[in-house]
Amino acid sequence: MTDKRVLTIQDISCFGQCSLTVALPIISACGIETAVIPSAVLSTHTSGFTGFTCHDLAEDIPKIHAHWKEVGVKFNAIYTGYLGSAEMIADVTAIMQTLGTEDGINIVDPAMADDGVLYPAFDMAYVEEMKKLCAAADIILPNITEACMLTGMEFKTVYDEAYIQELIAKLSELGAKTIILTGVSYQAGRTGVLVVEDGKQSYYEHHRIEKGCHGTGDVYASAFVGALLQGKDAFTAAKIAADYTVRCIEVTKDDAEHWYGVKFEKAIPELISAIYAE
Ligand code: PXL
């Protein structure tokens, strides 16, 4: 297989610009064939909307897996995001263990928490299952809140390098080989991403826009996957994804009506230029 093929497993929030409605267009725009397994169908995402519907698709996952094994389809990367229920995580892990090519990469965004709290649908049973999925991954992309949940460390908004090093040490103990820790901020107005690969650490610091936007974790992870599959090393992909996410927030932040997500479509040309320039 010369062209790269990715499978992404996450929910489809029909409105709200997150999870599959972000991952599929971004990774496809990067020139990568993208297959999906929707883990749940929601009317909207759960951050800021009330009264949303949710239909869990856990029962379909083993059936899709069985069919694909018959078909013989394989993936160069399997990337998981927001899943929905703890019960499906064992089946998702099984997919990661069987449907990858020989050199396939498993990428887990443990999308379950932000700003110190779990998303409404999740509890500690979900966190426990997510730890196992992270252990089966080659690359994990937690934010600081998710890293704290996965390691049992206290969430802090102000911290020093020693705190981040302790988080990294505990995340490494979980078993993931490469860690992309997002939202690492040591000073006002700046934030960044810490990439830990084979024990070697690199930090990419950039401008921090104070206004947080929904769905940016998914935008970040999807751009990272697209850049990585286009042959970038993990640090370069992490940097490209960070710059793209900042641009998505910049083009959205002054539009009060667009509170539910980011206008990631507007900045896709910049993402593609960055991938082909570097
Ligand atoms: O962006 C993460 C995400 C994905 N899917 C659903 C969500 C969220 C964040 O809240 O609610 C359904």
Image (cartoon, helix red, strand yellow):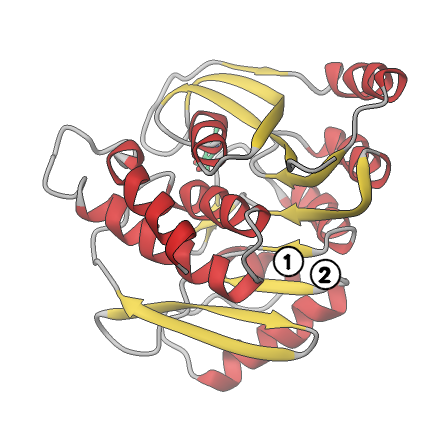
Give the residue furthest to the right. 70
Q: Quadrant of residue 170?
A: bottom right
Q: Position of residue 63 (x, y in %)?
A: 81, 14
Q: Is residue 259 left or right of residue 112?
A: left
Q: Is residue 28 above or below residue 15?
A: below
SS at mark 1?
Answer: helix
Instruction: Name the amino acid, label 2.
Output: Ala
167 or 271: which is nearer to us? 271
Q: Is residue 89 above or below residue 65?
A: below
Whichever of labels 1 and 2 marks the residue nearer the N terminus, that label is 1
Q: Is residue 112 visible?
A: yes
Image quadrant holding the C terminus, namely: bottom left
Instruction: Name the amino acid, label 1.
Output: Leu
Q: Is residue 260 left or right of residue 10?
A: left
Q: Position of residue 271 (x, y in %)?
A: 35, 46
Q: Position of residue 89 (x, y in %)?
A: 74, 35
Q: Which residue is mark 2?
A: 176
Q: Which residue is mark 1?
A: 150
Q: Please name which of the two marks, 1 or 2, marks the residue nearer to the observer.
A: 2
SS at mark 2?
Answer: loop
Q: Residue at x 58, y 29 (%)?
A: 33
